Image (spheres, coloured by chain):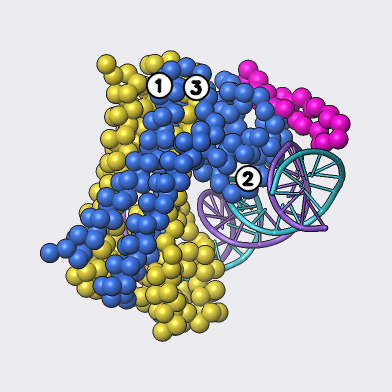
Chain colours: A blue, B yellow, C cyan, D purple
Amino acid sequence: MTIDYAILGILSCRSITGYDLKKIIQEIPFMYWSGNNNQIYKSLVDLLDRGLVTNEILHQESSPSKKIYTITAEGLSELKGWVQSAPEPPECKKMFLIQLAWSDQLNEEELNTMLNKYEEEIRMQILIQHEKNRRQPFSPDRTPREEKVWDMIYENIISSYENELLWVQKVRNEIFGN
Amino acid sequence: MTIDYAILGILSCRSITGYDLKKIIQEIPFMYWSGNNNQIYKSLVDLLDRGLVTNEILHQESSPSKKIYTITAEGLSELKGWVQSAPEPPECKKMFLIQLAWSDQLNEEELNTMLNKYEEEIRMQILIQHEKNRRQPFSPDRTPREEKVWDMIYENIISSYENELLWVQKVRNEIFGN
DNA sequence: GGTGTCATGTAAACAGTTACATGATTTT
DNA sequence: AAAATCATGTAACTGTTTACATGACACC
């Protein structure tokens, strides 16, 4: 599971509880495990078994006990190994392309409405991204280089959406233009 | 299941067997259900039950019998309804961004190697896409407008990869430049 | 004689999401 | 008094991928 490496990465910056990991992963936009993410509890047990993390149980009075997870030396080298492993190409699920592919039954007005809705949706996503970046939920910032790298990651996401916007405009031009 | 609509769409162009559907879905790049895709057999049963498709069984001597699926009027209107339904934003899984996010353990050379590998991978994907387009595995081409739409879909995929290339170059510049 | 294609499917594994359970505390 | 937060987790479901099974035929 690749979420394992997302967990190891976050733990490489600071030791935290599963609950906090869950919130961070939900907030960081490029960690696409979006909705209520309960796989992390299973992953943490797995990482413990493999000796890549350890945990310290804090019993609190009048509140459930916390488990604070910390990455081990083996965890760090496992993470480093994965980071350097062969990168996969991006996998994009663009449902809209499939909808567009079968748009032949629609008249011009209906097709135009489709494109408008998509454009609006993309604009909304760009706003959401900017908002997420503004709130800065989590960023390691251990070194100036890392700071730059994280900036570039956020830029990647925004630029993907902006590229999509340009494309919609081109489609409209190509089909309805001149 | 969204693969249902991919199936309905293909059947809206021509009546074919499940086997052929499988091959077409595998070949069309924006139908991302990639590997050996056996869900379609289950989907076809489902679509039959819902009356969105019918099938005609051809018994062949000395060869397994074929089931040729045809879309019904209800299937066509179901498809039209879905096409016009609210579009989802693209969902991109970019593992590389997660790898990059935890690259702080690497030295400059190792980081540069990572970026080079990713750039190479993206270039490879662009080649594969162009090759797929060249072979033209399936395109409906029922109307000039549909032809244009399909061209734009292919352009979307290529342009996403090209945007990714530009981004890698920018990252390299931002981190190692000047 | 082994591999590949045609054509259907089943079974199992894995990944990811949603819903639910617990139980105390804090906020509205 | 109701809702949200803290903190852990389980169970069930959906979606996707991989592997396997069948059986005839064609190709090398």
Query: Residue B72: percent from the left, percent from the top?
Result: 42, 83
Q: Is residue B29 visible?
A: yes
Give the number of the mark in front: 3 or 2: 3
Whole-percent x, y for residue A56 in the image? 76, 24
Residue at x-position 42% and y-position 74%? B81
Most foreground residue, A12 or A111: A111
Are there few (<14), some (14-19), or many (20+) residues within 10 Å of tag 2?
A: some
Foreground pick, D28 / B139: B139
Q: Quick check: A61 left or right of A54? A: right
Task: Check the residue under mark 2 and report the chain it is in.
Answer: A
Residue shown at the point (28%, 19%) measured from the top left: B177
Quarter of the image containing the N terminus of chain A? top right
Where does the magenta region start and end? A51-75
Q: Earlier in the sequence, mark 3 or mark 2?
A: 2
Kind of residue at disc 2:
Asn
Q: Which residue is mark 1?
A: B111
CA separation in Å, label 1 and label 2: 30 Å
The amino acid type found where label 1 is placed reads Leu
